[in-house]
Amino acid sequence: MQNSKLAIADSSTKSKQEETNMSQDNTSHAGRPGLDELVPSRYALKVGAIDVMVVSDGVLSLPGAMLGHNADQAVRAAWLEDKFLPPDVFEWALNAVVVRSGDRTILIDAGIGADPGLNLPRAGKLAQRLQAAGIDLASVTDVVLTHMHMDHCGGLLVDEVRERLRPDLRIHVAAFESKFWGGRPDFSRVHMPPGFPDALQRTAKRFLNEYDSRLRLFEKEYEVAPGVLVQRTGGHTPGHCVVRLASGGDRLTFAGDLVFQTGFEHPDWYNGFEHDPEEAARARVGLLRELAANRESLVATHLSLPSVCHVAVAGDVFRWVPSPWEY
């Protein structure tokens, strides 16, 4: 895949030096907001003629058991130790993607927002980081939601985001997903920390109330723009989707929550947020086998930034092969 800078920001008033130089003066003075952060929060690449930018919404600290609640505790602990990770807490990356195809600017997932019932000090950064990347929310023509868990749709409920969205914004979500959250969602098979089921339901109901008139529902798949195809997989939630990008000879899949870090070596481990874990595991294995066979690039919500990677087959399981960070 050919990587390049994403030309979304209007840089007409900046010199090249202003765009590229970073100093302690404009980044890290305590008590004064900086122009940017001293952490990587975005990564730009090209998929043929399609511009892509992976943008971090921050990180979410969750119990390590959430990675595989059906796994033997000792096996899961050994996996975490092998990855030099603590046994009790796992830092979940939160990634969204901005895609520009033709005259369409598409935001894939919208971050977690700011639920008052949860303490999320290092998450909910998407609006800030889109602004730092020069991406005007008013330029977004479409939003695609892989599903309606709060870390994917909650960002649209933040006041300063909602008021900047264009009135003709189209929000694409699977009909199964809208129906699931519009009724009484089943949480009988999830293994979430206390407070999360209530927060998820609260956010999804509010989202449907706020944005019902802008929803564009589809059944199995829908082409949002040239080379941008949304496909329903189910499993994680009934209407969970992946987004397939294709242009020229390049391909990339944004897998949403179908693939986690454990999903390569242990694709049969059940994530605590999966509403139908068996179906999620089947969909995960199918997607990983396809990506390994066609050497397609992968990005996922909860793979560490920049997230861009490839998939290799290793016997009955898979290997996560991070792509080189190209400057």
Image: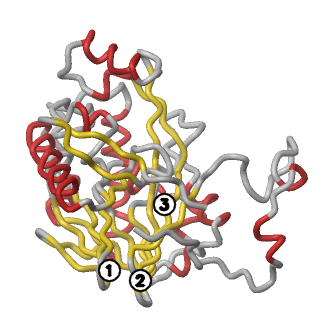
Q: Earlier in the sequence, mark 3 or mark 2?
A: 2
Rendered residue at 41%/15% (across/down): 87
Q: Residues within 10 Å of mark 3 (few under 14, many from 20)?
A: many
For this view, does 304 lie left or right of residue 181?
right
Q: Which of marks 1 and 2 is nearer the N terminus?
A: 2
Kindly indicate whether the residue at mark 2 contacts the one at mark 1 (C-beta within 8 angstroms). Answer: yes
Rendered residue at 36%/34% (across/down): 196
Question: Where does the image place residue 141, in percent across and percent down from the top left?
Answer: 43, 81
For this view, does 264 lie left or right of residue 315?
right
- Residue 54, numbered label: 3
Q: How crowded is mark 1: few (under 14 residues within 10 Å), some or many (20 or more)?
A: some
Amino acid carrying mark 1 in the image: Ser
Q: Which of the colour schemes (rainbow, by chain, secondary structure, one colour) is used?
A: secondary structure
Most extreme residue toward the top is: 74
Q: Is mark 2 on a helix, strand or loop?
A: loop
Rendered residue at 34%/72% (across/down): 171
Closer-to-camera residue (208/56): 56
Amino acid carrying mark 3 in the image: Val
Question: Where does the image place residue 231, in percent across and percent down from the top left?
Answer: 18, 66
Q: Is residue 31 above or below residue 252?
A: above
For this view, does 244 lie left or right of residue 167?
left
For this view, does 117 lie left or right of residue 244?
right
Closer-to-camera residue (295/215): 295
- Residue 13, numbered label: none
Q: In which quarter of the image is residue 200?
A: top left
Amino acid carrying mark 2 in the image: Ala
Q: What element carries label 3?
A: strand
Q: Quadrant of residue 174?
A: bottom left
- Residue 49, numbered label: 2
Q: Earlier in the sequence, mark 3 or mark 1?
A: 3
What is the distance, in whole Å, between disc 3 and disc 1 at their CAs? 18 Å
